[in-house]
Amino acid sequence: MNGTLRFAGKLSLVIALLLLLLSYAMFQGGFVSWFLFFGALPIFLYHLGLLFYPIKNWRVTRSLSRHVTRAGDHVQVNLLIKRSIPFPLYYCICEEIFPDSLQKVDDSHERYRYLAQPGKLHIARKIKKIVFPGFRRVIELPYFIEQLPRGEHQLQAVRIRTGDVFGIITKEHIFHVEDQIAVFPNERPVQLGENMNSYEQGSVSSQSINLKNTNVATGIREYTPGDKFSWIDWKQTARKNTVITKEFEQEKSTDTVVVLDACYHQGINDLAFETGIELTMSLLGSIQKRTSQAGFLSIGGNTVYLPLHHDPAKKDWIKQHLTRIQPGGTIRTSVKLREEMMQITPGANIILVTTHLENEFQNAVRQIRQRNKKFIIIFIQASELISKHELNMIRQLRADGIVINVLTENELARKIIEVSIV
């Protein structure tokens, strides 16, 4: 309705000006007045043509250099506009309408400096391009989306404006062009302070990270691709006239569960939460490289638990989950953590990544520790935002024998993040 009224108003204005000039020429007479009328007539006819010109019939497409990337990277976008009627246009303004998820930036190298001021990374992202098409049927507009934040971003619409030189006639239309960009979290090098592998017998942790114990041979078998050269039993090979390798006692990998605290709380530090997601992904990769069995658990609006047994499909699923996840839920972290830990097999090593230590957290940790071998906490927060209550709780947890790592902007700025598990 509003568009119809605007169209009627502009049409009335152009006709009124044309009739006004015509009446002036008729009543005034003479060469000059009629010269002005016929000289201005093409301009009025152009305005009438522009008024009835349907820009909504244009075809707008968007192509991306890549649909999957990592946080902090950029994507090149190319807008292609095709129109069937080459009506002359003086200017054309194309604007990408960005979703709320892209109204922030992620500088993977410098963002930790703003851990205490995460609001500085929120921006009003705008991309506007002006072009002077003239009679061109095809218009191509390239641009870049820089410093992409983690998440799945839906590019849905492009706004196009055009008009005449004097600004009497302006036309605008929003073209719905859908594209998706999946931005995975980055992985950082993580150095663990102790290895978490143990043998089937005994309770002493192994300080070596070999897939098999090469000191205790339990039998022999035929060679299979992938066996080490040092495993060959030369005596049995000569006797059987085929390559025979020693079979060693399988080293037991202690189950490790990495828990991500995605519960929403008032005053949550968005940048610390993003760092927690990045660190969770890095921990899972680091533990898997050490041949340990690792599980993943996220608590928040939706609880997701997925054990990992060297299954690439599950790793990809976790990566997609960490790409989409946002803080949510109304249940406190301590309550949610206590409930979910009861569903996990006792005896596992638990690594909790969190950005908030609440009042009941200490009691929940004590209960969980009774069922598991180790409970390691990684607390991520800006140094100046750690409250006195949280500092006291950290001291109490350490006095109880709980391993807690406090990662501030100083630790996160290093090339390798060190996490102690002893």
Image (spheres, rainbow, N blue to C red):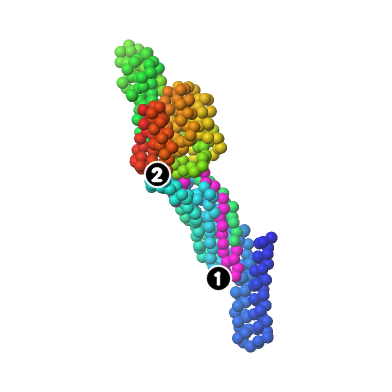
Q: Is residue 336 above or below residue 268?
A: above
Q: Residue at x 52, y 25 (%)?
A: 342
Quarter occupied by the C terminus: top left
Which comes before the other along the chain, label 1 or label 2?
1
Say which amino acid is labelled 1: Val
Instruction: Select label 1 or label 2 by which is in front.
Output: 2
Which residue carries the number 1 mark?
165
Element on which disc 2 rests? helix
Is 264 located above or below residue 305 in the figure?
below
Residue 169 colored magenta?
yes
- Front one among 343 and 50: 343
| 422 displayed left or right of 266 | left
Residue displayed at 35% across by 38% down: 416
Q: Quadrant of residue 217?
A: top left
Quadrant into which the N terminus falls? bottom right
Q: Residues within 10 Å of mark 2 (few under 14, many from 20)?
A: few
User: Looking at this rendering, what residue extends furthest in the top direction?
Assistant: 239
Q: Amino acid at mark 2?
A: Glu
Q: Residue 325 at what x, y percent from top left?
A: 51, 39
Distance from the alpha carbon under mark 1 to that under mark 2: 55 Å
Q: Nearer the viewer, residue 357 or 129?
A: 357
Q: Which stretch did the figure color magenta?
A: 146-171
Residue corresponding to mark 2: 384
